[in-house]
Image (tube, rainbow, N blue to C red):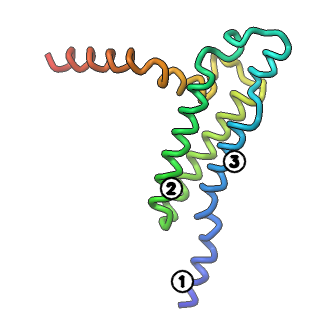
Amino acid sequence: MEHSAKAEKRTWPWLVLPHVLFATTVLVTLLVPDRAVEAVRTGLSLAASYGDKGLAGHLSFVGVLLVVEAAALVRRKRLSHADVSSIVFAFLLAWEVATAKLPVAVSLLYPSPEQVLGVFATGWPLIVRGLQSSGLILGT
């Protein structure tokens, strides 16, 4: 009995880590201004610095975070799932900070998650048409 209690105490912080990373990523995404906002304040155009996919990208990125968090909550008692969720959230947080919040990466070469997911959110009709076309070609 004592051995399982020790194991439970040892794993408790690791089971909470994905939820802390989720909250941190959502707060950083929504509260820390993007470098594009700073570019607009300095006189650059919004389209040149951030693209047309701003709001749709933020909403879709938060949607992806919510899906990963829901999966972590469903399987919350498994340490292996907590490890995978922590890695996913750490990667998404690092990607968000490195590309959208800090001016260290060229946005053309390293797009932010909002830009990538904004393309999926606004361009889904074209994506579906392309998938249908590819399915027809593969089916014949």
Ranked by sequence position, the earlier of labels 3 and 2 is: 3
Above/below status of 43 relative to 127: above
Q: In the picture provided, is 14 more to the left or to the right than 129?
A: right
Q: Amino acid at mark 3?
A: Thr
Residue highlighted by disc 2? 72
Which of labels 1 and 3 is toward the front? 3
Res 105 → quadrant: top right
- Lateral position of residue 70 relative to residue 22, left or right: left
Vertical placement of residue 121 versus 17, above or below: above
Could you classify mark 3 by the number of other residues whose Cα lies within 10 Å: few (under 14), some (14-19), or many (20 or more)?
A: some
Image quarter (top left, top right, bottom left or bottom right) of the C terminus: top left
Q: Tell me, yes or no, whether the two marked residues, 2 and 1, touch with CB atoms within 8 Å.
A: no
Between the residue at mark 3 and the residue at mark 2, the CA separation in whole angstroms equals 15 Å
Which residue is the site of mark 1?
A: 4
Q: Residue furthest bottom?
A: 1
Kindly identify the residue that appears in the image at 61 percent across and 39 percent down: 92
Q: Which mark is residue 24?
A: 3
Cβ atoms at labels 3 and 2 below 8 Å apart: no
Question: Which numbered mark, 2 or 1, is in the foreground of this view?
Answer: 2
Q: Quadrant of residue 55?
A: top right
Residue type indicated by callout 1 = Ser
